[in-house]
Image: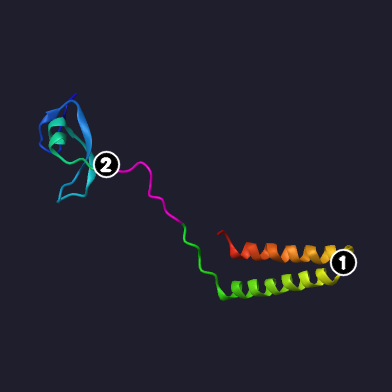
């Protein structure tokens, strides 16, 4: 079985896949004869896509305000835990502070 080379028009049996650029047509991959492939520049596409870093999304003013509010609550809970005697009240205030700090980290997002 032989086919006509889209570049030179001669028939060939074994060919090479290249990116055939014709000013009249859109560029596309075609099989051409080895003679045309050896004279041409072959364009190879990378198998892996480019590495793209995700840019962090800017935070809105509402998120910044919530972070400031939670920071204040966490500081107040830590102060209350420092003044409370060692016991249930101290552990409760420390748990509250840790909860607020966790919420702050969640709103700040990945680093």
| Lateral position of residue 80 relative to residue 12, left or right | right
- Please name the residue that numbered disc 1 is placed on: 89
Q: Position of residue 51 (x, y in %)?
A: 41, 50
**Element at label 2:** loop
Secondary structure beneath dot 1 equals helix
Identify the residue position indicated by label 2 in the image: 44
- The picture places residue 54, in percent across and down from the top left corner, at 47, 58
Q: In the picture provided, is 78 more to the left or to the right than 23?
A: right
Residue 31 within the segment the image draws in magenta: no
- Quadrant position of residue 98: bottom right
Q: Which residues are magenta?
A: 45-53
**28 in relation to 96, above or below:** above
* Up-down relation of residue 7 to residue 24 (above or below): above
The residue that appears at 87% across and 66% down in the rendered structure is 89
Q: Nearer the viewer, mark 2 or mark 1?
A: 1
Q: Which dot marks residue 102?
A: none
Q: Quadrant of residue 39?
A: top left
Magenta span dominant secondary structure = loop
The picture quadrant where one finds residue 34 is top left
Within-10-Å neighbours for mark 1: few <14, some 14–19, many 20+: some
Q: Nearer the viewer, residue 110 or 39?
A: 110
Tell me if residue 46 is in the magenta stretch.
yes
């Amino acid at each position: 079985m032989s086919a006509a080379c889209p570049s030179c028009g001669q028939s060939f049996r074994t060919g090479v896949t290249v990116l055939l650029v014709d000013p009249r047509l859109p560029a596309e991959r075609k099989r051409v004869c080895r003679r045309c492939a050896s004279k041409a520049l072959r364009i190879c596409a990378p198998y892996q896509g480019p590495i793209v870093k995700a840019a962090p999304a800017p935070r809105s003013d509402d998120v910044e305000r919530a972070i400031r509010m939670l920071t204040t609550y966490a500081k107040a809970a830590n102060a209350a835990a420092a003044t409370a005697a060692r016991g249930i009240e101290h552990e409760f205030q420390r748990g509250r502070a840790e909860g607020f700090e966790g919420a702050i980290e969640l709103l700040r997002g990945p680093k």
